[in-house]
């Protein structure tokens, strides 16, 4: 049977091409190998290197390093019992401060008053429920609530910065209320060697 | 430049439309209807035997079977039932016995052949109406051997066009977040069948909220790689990346391209307050869209680019609102449930898909864009989150922990035919479905 075949038009197809080998379907290709980072293209924000510079100036203190750095080093971001600054905990989808939370913040404020050179980054964290983005916003609210209360107790706002990790860096990995309660927290990290923003 | 980047190169795969088509279509397939019985023969090797022959013969057929099953519109008859020898029978009407296919219950039949020359493969694919003894589609493709799956995806898109009048969406990609079983969350891009998996980020921090540019060339995502979270626009073709500088003391949590690709609506957090900003493609602020003291996150555009659906906690709990971008007028969309997030506007414009809390679980809902009763699409015996529409609005991809870890799934917009897409050892979340790709 004769089939008329028209060669009408070429359709351009986006094709994945590897600069290097190992591009077989199903293979995972990493843009930044051992020899280069995407950030080194000059357009990105200096992937890794800028962060390293900052972290190099952060002194390991009794509070531990930032949760992100702890995670990168394979360590728990749980606050050590020896830390002079204790975590504050929140209810699900809430960022208001309970009486317990205020008591902890008053103790944290007392320590900050006795250590006037210490600058602190307040990390807001959430449990895993809900969407990542909403939890990033909620974590920011939690950190800000703690910051404002410390300010109201006389700690200068410029000594206190905030960051939200949302639900991204839990201290407890199980899917239970016992675990979630521990993850809904504000954590206080003493910064040295760089100004807060 | 010494940079090891994957490039997307145009023009490697050439489609040569061909062959007389029948006038009448198969029956139009509706949702929830009977699945059309179709057989997909392994392809015939029309050239010399090479090391790739067996892989191509069944690999192209397997990729088509995957797509046809995923669509929910076809029942693919199992290959073990096939009667003829694919390597000895013909691939054009009259050169094989239609009875071999009608006997096993196939109303539709896909046959084809291929030949390999060097690292190029030429593939010829045909769709037959077994019942009427007619050929419906015939196409010839050439491309690199390693891209053979994409040829299969493109032909299935043609098959779906033949049946429904609208091309399929299998020549697309999904961008998503995966921890690959480790501590870090990185951005990946792959085809719906998991092939051609490409790692966009490898910075060992937390990368979130990937979003495709409407031209399919770039992925916008947020990252903690510079410690302070902000947005990055990564161009897949060149490996170039732009960092969006947040306002002083603030950070960008996520962004979504407008349908025309010219602007981005971004969530910006400062002093604990999150608000929506309109940015240009390089991250410059055009104007602030909301200025509330609460939480305003997860924006998504209407297909005409005139409205934005987003989440606000201004009522005391996260609910979904719609804002007219021009006037700023805002109305509340969801009233049932105490926790509704991550809305996405259907490409058809009629419905909005979102994640809602049911008891202690999260489920996917859709609701008419002008308000009304929500429709729950997933069961609450597990969590389903992060819905994203296919470019034709007929499918929704999402993440769910129904198999333990979070994996990506796809379902029809009605909620029918929920099927798993990914199976990495870790949690795969936050899917973003690409536009149709060439």
Image (spheres, coloured by chain):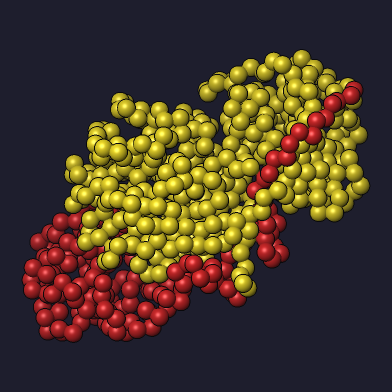
Chain colours: A red, B yellow
Please state the horizontal and vertical placement of residue B402, each as a whole percent of the image.
46, 44
Please state the horizontal and vertical placement of residue A187, each as a whole percent of the image.
25, 69
Picture residue at 83% right of the left edge, 19% below the top: B99
Please state the horizontal and vertical placement of residue A155, each as a whole percent of the image.
12, 74
Position of residue B426 in the picture relative to residue B113 (left or right): left
The C terminus of chain B: image quadrant: top right
Q: Is residue B281 above or below residue B251?
A: above
Farthest residue toward the left?
A: A153
Relative depth, front residue between B283 and B348: B283
Question: Is residue A15 visible in this depiction of the protein?
Answer: yes
Relative depth, front residue between A192 and B44: A192
Picture residue at 89% right of the left edge, 31% below the top: B89
Q: Is residue A53 above or below residue B361?
A: below
Question: Is residue B428 visible in this depiction of the protein?
Answer: no
Please state the horizontal and vertical placement of residue B112, each as a whole percent of the image.
80, 34
Numbered label tally:
0
Q: Is residue B135 above or below residue B430?
A: above
Position of residue B321 in the picture relative to residue B437 (left or right): left
The N terminus of chain B: image quadrant: bottom right
Picture residue at 28% right of the left edge, 66% below the top: B248
Quadrant of res B188 = bottom right
Position of residue B181 in the picture relative to residue B84 (left or right): left
Picture residue at 70% right of the left edge, 40% below the top: A11
Q: Is residue B246 above or below residue B344?
A: below
């Amino acid at each position: 049977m004769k089939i008329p075949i028209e060669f009408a038009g070429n359709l351009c197809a986006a094709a994945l091409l590897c600069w290097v080998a190992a591009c077989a379907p199903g293979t995972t290709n990493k843009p930044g190998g051992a020899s280069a980072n995407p950030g080194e293209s000059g357009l990105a924000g200096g992937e890794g290197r800028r962060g390293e510079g900052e972290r190099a100036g952060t002194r390991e203190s009794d509070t531990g390093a930032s949760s992100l750095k702890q995670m990168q080093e394979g360590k728990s971001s749980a606050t050590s019992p020896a830390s002079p600054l204790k975590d504050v905990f929140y209810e699900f989808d809430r960022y208001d401060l309970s009486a317990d939370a205020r008591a902890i913040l008053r103790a944290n404020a007392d320590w900050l008053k006795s250590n006037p050179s210490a600058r602190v980054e307040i990390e807001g964290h959430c449990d895993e429920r809900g969407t990542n983005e909403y939890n990033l916003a909620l974590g920011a609210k939690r950190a800000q609530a703690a910051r404002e209360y410390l300010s109201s107790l006389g700690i200068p706002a410029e000594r206190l910065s905030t960051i939200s990790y949302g639900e991204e860096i839990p201290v407890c990995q199980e899917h239970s209320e016992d675990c979630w309660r521990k993850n809904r927290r504000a954590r206080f990290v003493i910064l040295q060697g760089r100004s807060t923003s | 430049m010494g940079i090891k980047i994957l490039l997307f190169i145009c023009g490697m795969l050439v489609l040569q439309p061909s062959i007389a088509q029948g006038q009448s279509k198969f029956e139009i397939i509706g949702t929830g209807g009977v699945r059309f019985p179709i057989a997909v023969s392994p392809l015939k090797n029309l050239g010399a035997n090479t090391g790739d022959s067996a892989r191509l013969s069944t690999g192209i057929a397997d990729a088509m079977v995957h797509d046809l099953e995923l669509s929910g519109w076809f029942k693919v008859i199992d290959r073990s039932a096939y009667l003829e020898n694919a390597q000895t029978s013909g691939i054009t009407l009259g050169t094989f016995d239609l009875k071999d296919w009608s006997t096993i219950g196939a109303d539709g039949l896909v046959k084809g052949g291929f030949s390999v020359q060097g690292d190029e493969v030429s593939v010829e694919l045909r769709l037959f109406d077994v019942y009427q003894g007619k050929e419906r589609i015939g196409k010839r493709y050439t491309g690199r051997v390693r891209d053979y799956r994409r040829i299969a995806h493109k032909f299935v898109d043609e098959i779906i066009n033949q049946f429904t009048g609208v091309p399929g969406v299998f020549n697309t990609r999904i961008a998503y977040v995966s921890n690959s079983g480790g501590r870090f969350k990185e951005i990946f891009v792959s085809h719906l069948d998991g092939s051609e998996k490409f790692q966009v980020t490898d910075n060992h921090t937390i990368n979130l909220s990937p979003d495709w540019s409407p031209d399919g060339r770039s992925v916008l995502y947020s990252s903690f790689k510079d410690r302070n979270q902000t947005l990055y626009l990564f161009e897949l073709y060149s490996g170039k990346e732009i960092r969006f500088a947040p306002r002083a003391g603030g950070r960008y949590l996520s962004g979504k391209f407008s349908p025309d690709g010219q602007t981005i609506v971004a969530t910006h957090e400062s002093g604990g307050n999150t608000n929506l900003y309109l940015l240009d493609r390089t991250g410059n602020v055009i104007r602030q869209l909301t200025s509330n003291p609460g939480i305003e996150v997860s924006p998504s555009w209407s297909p005409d680019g005139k409205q934005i659906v987003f989440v606000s906690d201004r009522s005391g709990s996260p609910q979904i609102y719609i804002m007219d971008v021009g006037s700023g007028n805002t109305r509340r969309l969801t009233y049932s449930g105490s926790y509704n997030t991550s809305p996405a506007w259907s490409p058809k414009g009629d419905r909005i898909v979102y994640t809602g809390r049911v008891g202690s679980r999260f489920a996917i809902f859709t609701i008419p864009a002008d308000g009304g009763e929500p429709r729950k699409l997933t069961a609450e015996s597990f969590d389903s989150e992060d819905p994203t529409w296919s470019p034709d609005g007929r499918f929704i991809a999402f993440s769910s922990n129904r198999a333990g870890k979070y994996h990506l799934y796809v379902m029809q917009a009605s909620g029918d035919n929920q099927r798993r897409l990914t199976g990495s050892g870790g949690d795969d979340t936050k899917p973003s479905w690409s536009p149709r790709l060439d």
